[in-house]
Image (spheres, rainbow, N blue to C red):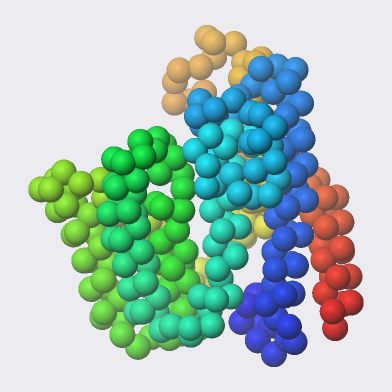
């Protein structure tokens, strides 16, 4: 979207408007939904053991600042930590793009961040400030380097910026080797089993795009993924209340429930796209049109 609107006037302002109305209205609706679910049923979001929901937590969640507070990062909306990470990235995205880095330097930026912030910085913060390990995992301290990796893959696959491919591969190998060696030899928390599947997934995406492999089913899920993600926790919670215990505990039951939850979440996602997401998109388009 950033590339397609390269000639657009006031591109950064319009980028923020579009991203805000894509994310915020539906997320705020989910906040209200889970507040009432929790109020009437005692349901707690994943990670809510950090702190029960409170007025402060709700205000931080409404302003997308909950990702900076251990007591709020995942307390109000299940899985809400990912939205905090995403909004934090969007805040920095235009600045990051202004440097016009090549893929190899974008990946290097991610590695340096991982080394200085994700390994050294988070280790110091956990040691001196006793930050919960769960918060460090959910926060920008650990998660942010995923975005430079994604941008690098985009540049290599869509932009076809193919120079320095060898150095891109070398950096990936260095990243993985360092994460394993420092973890097992130096006993440092480098999360090798977090980054290895990320690079495997990134390489898979790269190959799919370069070979023009299209999977319509997954493409459709991609268009619905945001609303599906927000609401599937509530769907699982409802099923958990009514599914007998004797029906659980085997692979067949898991596969059946997984498929059923997926389909129900997709239907909810379609409903969301036709209502909340459509309405917020209209508002964004009107505001962008007013800017000119």
Near-viewer residue (259 or 141):
141
Judge from the rendering whether residue 266 lies leftward or rightward of residue 180; answer left or right: right
Quadrant for the N terminus in the image: bottom right
Task: Write the residue at 67% across / 57% down.
Answer: 223
Task: Write the residue at 61% across / 82% down.
Answer: 3
Please say if 95 is above or below 137. below
Residue 4 location in percent, x, y? Answer: 66, 82
Residue 77 location in percent, x, y? Answer: 64, 36
Instruction: Tell me how many marks there are.
Output: 0
Residue 126 location in percent, x, y? Answer: 33, 41
Please say if 176 is above or below 44. below
Q: Quadrant of residue 104?
A: bottom left
Quadrant for the C terminus in the image: bottom right
Near-viewer residue (229 or 92):
92
Task: Write the residue at 73% across / 53% down.
Answer: 24
Q: Quadrant of residue 277?
A: bottom right
Please say if 220 is above or below 11. above
Q: Please indicate, yes or no, whether residue 196 appears anywhere in the rendered image.
A: yes
**Outermost residue to the left:** 185
Q: Quadrant of residue 43?
A: top right
Near-viewer residue (4 or 52):
52
Residue 235 location in percent, x, y? Answer: 67, 30
């Amino acid at each position: 979207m950033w590339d397609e609107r390269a000639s657009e006037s006031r591109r950064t302002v319009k980028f923020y408007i579009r991203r805000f109305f894509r994310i915020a209205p539906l997320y705020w609706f989910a906040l209200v939904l889970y507040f009432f679910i929790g109020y009437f049923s005692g349901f707690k979001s994943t990670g809510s053991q950090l702190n029960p929901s409170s007025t402060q937590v709700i205000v931080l969640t409404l302003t997308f600042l909950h990702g900076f507070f251990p007591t709020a990062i995942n307390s109000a909306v299940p899985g809400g930590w990912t939205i905090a990470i995403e909004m934090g990235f969007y805040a920095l995205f235009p600045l990051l793009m202004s440097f016009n880095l090549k893929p190899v330097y974008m990946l290097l930026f991610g590695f340096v961040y991982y080394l200085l912030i994700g390994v050294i910085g988070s280790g110091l913060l956990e040691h001196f400030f006793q930050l919960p390990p769960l918060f460090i995992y959910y926060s920008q301290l650990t998660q942010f380097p995923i975005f430079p990796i994604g941008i690098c893959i985009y540049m290599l696959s869509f932009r076809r910026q193919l120079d320095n491919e060898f150095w891109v591969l070398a950096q990936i190998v260095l990243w993985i080797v360092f994460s394993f060696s420092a973890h097992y030899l130096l006993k440092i928390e480098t999360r090798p089993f977090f980054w290895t599947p990320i690079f495997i997934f990134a390489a898979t995406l790269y190959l799919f795009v370069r070979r023009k492999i299209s999977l319509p089913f997954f493409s459709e899920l991609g268009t619905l993924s945001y609303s599906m993600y927000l609401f599937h926790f509530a769907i699982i919670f409802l099923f958990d209340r009514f599914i007998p215990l004797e029906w659980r505990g085997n692979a067949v039951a898991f596969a059946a429930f997984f498929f059923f939850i997926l389909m129900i979440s997709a239907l909810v996602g379609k409903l969301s796209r036709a209502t909340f997401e459509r309405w917020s998109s209209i508002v964004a388009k009107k505001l962008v049109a007013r800017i000119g």
